[in-house]
């Protein structure tokens, strides 16, 4: 398998210590929670990302994140990597995160680029959901 | 528990087997100056005669395992070449009688790809769907037979599922209609008894490396009575009665012969052992929730166990089972990102198909290896389900078929 050591480490750490790596869920009905779910079982990957935010002045800051991912090792590693990038960022900063940031951080092989695209879609959707609630 | 187990554990015997040490010894006796290294086609000296004798002895061992005449065995480079020779050989020789071929969607690529090639050459091919249990029935074949059908090619044991097709009923039908019947039996030798004297099969492909022999050698059975003729696909010297030219690879041939001799001798003992391993494995794994066996359990060999772990993706499971060598018909393992075409053909739901893993055991698998593997599976499935949004939805009672997924 053409996996970088970074993908393998991230994957293994995430499955071995799920709590530490933000695996879990928030109640999606909470007003300060935004949920994004992208992908499909038929395509082999589904990512669910939830952000919990706090308003600070005229901006909103991501205080906590939870995720669950069904997918290949790269998909799970991509979600986990994204989650780490998000905590403490404002929504504006989070919107700036691009799939290429994940590709570079994990050294994803070309055949797994779609995993990073899916991760980018999941944060977009989670932010959209959150903003609609405010 | 793992201290006395050598990792990684090999659970992929259906992909290839290690060479039996007795076979390796036989091979090494046929390589060097001190050994029997001659060219079996050399007629003018003892080196050639001795090599020829070794090749013919090996041919008898192969014939003996499947109960046919040694003169009906043609050496090839493996089952892939044997499949090509049978399918293209019949098609080319008998195309005046018709240009229609029947095969199935769950055949090995070594059958499907030659059929695709023949389609490009103007033949028509019908690819049959298996039933829910992964079997190709005589009834399905009967419905597909046309006036111009010249060949039926159906595998004996499916490599992904381990399901066993009923060769007798399919062959009887083929005989009635005067259609040639080819069988890919790469997975069969040493696992189930084959009696070509009574089976109505015209051509059968064999491989050495699935039965503790070396890679790079196989054979094609070509029936003499009633006579089956094939057009050669490789020319250059007219070896193997003109059906397959090329200097015979003595060391590989004696390896295959020895492997098949041992297979005949030890088939009953091997089968009993593997059945016990299968039982041990299956009884533990079936304690896990939402686990499904793929392929008809009543028509299946014990050395292959194909299991779907629902709501867990196959490649991530294989990655989590890094100390176990297994194979997956899963998304992501191939460049095509498609679930196994065999499981697709069974009509499995995609999320089940994408979590299927094939475990296959063999002569050197131990009880300890099975126990250790099952404990790792338990752990990995639990962890990955904790991570799976689909598992969460299942626990919440959500029917995944009703969700409006965003396909990409």
Image: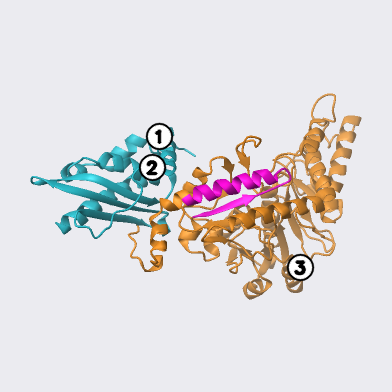
Give the letter of the orange chain.
B
**Front-most of residues B183 and A11:** A11
Query: Mark 1 falls within which chain?
Result: A
Query: Mark 2 falls within which chain?
Result: A
Whether residue B160 is visible, yes or no, is no
Q: Which residue is mark 1?
A: A6
Residue B141: x percent and y percent? 65, 71
For the point 77% across and 41% down, the residue is: B237
Residue A71: x percent and y percent? 42, 50
Instruction: Say yes or no: labels 1 and 3 on the same chain.
Output: no
Mark 2 vs 1: CB contact within 8 A: yes
Secondary element at image label 1: helix
**Mark-to-mark CA distance, 3 and 2:** 50 Å
Q: Which residue is mark 2?
A: A77
Picture mark count: 3
Q: Where is residue B122, by image quadrant?
A: bottom right
Secondary element at image label 3: helix
Which residues are the magenta region? B355-382
Number of the label disc, if any, that sits on residue B168: 3
Query: Crowdedness of circle 1 by 10 Å Cα count: few (<14), some, many (20+)?
Result: some
For the point 40% across and 50% down, the residue is: B387
- Quadrant where the C terminus of chain A is found in the figure: bottom left
**Front-most of residues B92 and B295:** B295
Q: Nearer the viewer, mark 1 or mark 3?
A: 1
**Mark-to-mark CA distance, 2 and 1:** 9 Å
For the point 40% across and 67% down, the residue is: B399
């Amino acid at each position: 398998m053409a996996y970088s050591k970074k993908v393998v480490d991230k994957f293994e750490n995430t499955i071995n210590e799920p709590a530490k790596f933000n695996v879990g869920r928030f109640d999606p009905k909470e007003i300060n929670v935004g949920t994004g779910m992208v992908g499909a079982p038929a395509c082999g990957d589904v990512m669910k990302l939830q952000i919990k935010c706090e308003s600070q002045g005229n901006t909103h800051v991501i205080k906590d994140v939870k995720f669950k991912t069904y997918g290949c090792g790269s998909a799970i590693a991509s979600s986990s990597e994204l989650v780490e990038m998000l905590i403490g960022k404002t929504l504006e900063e989070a919107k700036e995160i691009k799939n290429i940031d994940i590709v570079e951080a994990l050294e994803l092989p070309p055949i797994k680029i779609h995993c990073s695209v899916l991760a980018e879609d999941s944060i977009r959707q989670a932010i959209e959901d959150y903003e609609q609630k405010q | 528990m793992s201290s006395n187990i050598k990792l990684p554990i090999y659970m992929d015997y259906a992909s290839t087997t290690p060479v039996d040490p007795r076979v390796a010894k036989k091979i090494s006796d046929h390589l060097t100056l001190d050994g029997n290294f001659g060219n079996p086609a050399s007629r003018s000296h003892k080196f050639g005669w001795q090599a020829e004798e070794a090749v013919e002895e090996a041919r008898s061992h192969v014939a003996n395992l499947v109960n046919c005449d040694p003169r009906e065995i043609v050496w090839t480079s493996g089952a892939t070449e044997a499949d090509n020779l049978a399918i293209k050989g019949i098609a080319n020789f008998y195309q005046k009688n018709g240009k229609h071929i029947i095969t199935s969607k769950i055949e090995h690529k070594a059958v499907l790809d030659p059929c695709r090639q023949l389609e490009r050459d103007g033949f028509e091919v019908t690819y049959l769907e298996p039933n829910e249990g992964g079997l190709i029935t005589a009834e399905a074949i009967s419905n597909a037979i046309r006036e111009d059908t010249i060949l039926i090619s159906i595998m004996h044991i499916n490599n992904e599922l381990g399901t066993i097709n009923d060769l007798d009923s399919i062959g009887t039908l083929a005989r009635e209609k005067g259609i040639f019947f080819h069988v890919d039996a790469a997975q069969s030798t040493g696992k189930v008894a084959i009696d070509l004297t009574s089976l109505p099969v015209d051509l059968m492909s064999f491989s050495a490396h699935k039965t503790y022999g070396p890679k790079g050698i196989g054979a094609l059975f070509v029936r003499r009575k009633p006579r089956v003729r094939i057009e050669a696909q490789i020319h250059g010297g007219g070896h193997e009665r003109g059906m397959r030219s090329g200097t015979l690879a003595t060391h590989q041939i004696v390896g295959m012969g020895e492997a098949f001799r041992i297979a005949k001798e030890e088939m009953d003992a091997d089968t009993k052992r593997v059945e016990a391993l299968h039982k041990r494995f299956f009884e533990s794994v079936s304690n896990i929730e939402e686990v499904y066996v793929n392929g008809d359990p009543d028509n299946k060999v014990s050395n292959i166990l194909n299991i779907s772990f629902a709501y867990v993706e196959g490649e991530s499971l294989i990655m989590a089972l890094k100390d176990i060598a297994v194979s997956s018909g899963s998304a992501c393992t191939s460049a095509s990102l498609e679930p196994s075409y065999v499981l697709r053909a069974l009509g499995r739901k995609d999320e089940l198909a994408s979590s299927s893993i094939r475990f296959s055991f063999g002569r050197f698998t131990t009880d300890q290896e099975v126990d250790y593997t099952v404990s790792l599976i338990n752990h990995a499935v639990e962890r990955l389900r904790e991570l799976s949004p689909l598992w969460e939805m299942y626990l919440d009672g959500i029917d995944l078929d009703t969700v409006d997924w965003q396909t990409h």
